[in-house]
Amino acid sequence: MEDQMRISLDLANQALNIGEVPVGCIFLYNDRVIARGKNSVNETRNATRHAERNCVDEVVDKYKDTWHDVMSKVTVVVTVEPCIMCASLLYSLKVPKIVYGCNNDRFGGCGSVMDVLPLYSLECQLVAGVLKDEAMSLLKTFYAGTNPNAPLSKVKIKKK
Amino acid sequence: MEDQMRISLDLANQALNIGEVPVGCIFLYNDRVIARGKNSVNETRNATRHAERNCVDEVVDKYKDTWHDVMSKVTVVVTVEPCIMCASLLYSLKVPKIVYGCNNDRFGGCGSVMDVLPLYSLECQLVAGVLKDEAMSLLKTFYAGTNPNAPLSKVKIKKK
């Protein structure tokens, strides 16, 4: 999953470069990327516009009547553990697999702060820690208040 | 808050009559109703279209650039305790007060199953149990699988 995670990290880096909390996400369906999202809280002036939700909206737009079925077969690849709101959103949509990078120690809904999965009657495979250091470096850069447009010497993202 | 809750119960009843899980919600701002929402999961074919989220979207549409400010002064009046996803959504938007009817024993995010408030750096006043029997009766009617279009002999909702 590292190759796919690098796509999400690239999206997170794009978010960082425009002053957003650097989180990126893709949805895979039949091994194809069908949605790409990044945090857009500042751009949209909407505190709930997280990367995962933006991907869900892309799937809703793209697949019309079949989007629920698509969601039930999607693999989510996101740089940071989904927050409680987004984890609940993904589980509500019966996503079968979530791959994430670093933990979300403040709001993580996949176990770091709370584990909301047991509330939903489904199995969801969770794969944590994929390229977690890269994901965490992006967050640290953001929260350190360094110039997000400056070269990120500590963050190496291999472009696809 | 009973008068306001009856507006939400009326919305929940409307949801029941079209085969939706009967949950209704209003947002109050300066004592005025600025948003009315009901569960619309079936109608929209979107498992995450809960009453509270529909109200949030109405505020986003209505108040454009000031909607975050409005949300930080809103009182939410909802017939059923918000689920974890919706509680997180409302807390993310810094809602200062939530009034609800019956508990949500499966997904409640305001204490019944989980209490997600401590994760958010804010105070939110929670008032539980307002006309809870009426709210619960609607849910029981729905889950009993009775004809939602039949007269609801056990549910008395005083129209405003």
Image: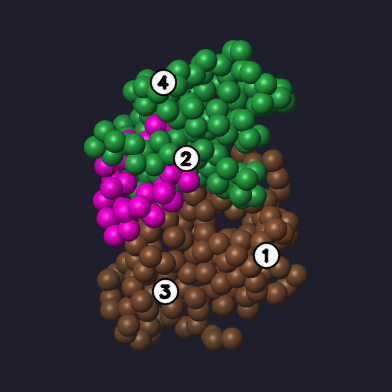
Chain colours: A green, B brown
Badge 4 is on which residue? A130
Q: Amino acid at mark 4?
A: Val
Q: Amino acid at mark 2?
A: Gly
Kindly identify which numbered label has been placed on residue B15: 3
Q: CA distance from mark 2 to mark 3?
A: 32 Å
Q: Which residues are magenta?
A: A54-80
B153 in magenta: no
Badge 2 is on which residue? A37
Dot 3 surroundings within 10 Å: few (below 14), some, or many (20 or more)? many
- Residue furthest top in the image: A154
Q: Relative to the observer, which residue lies in front, B89 or B108? A: B89
Q: Name the image quarter holding the C terminus of chain B.
A: bottom right
**Rendered image quadrant of residue A5:** top left
Where does residue A81 sit, x and y in percent of width and height? 48, 31
A55 in magenta: yes
Q: CA distance from mark 3 to mark 4?
A: 43 Å
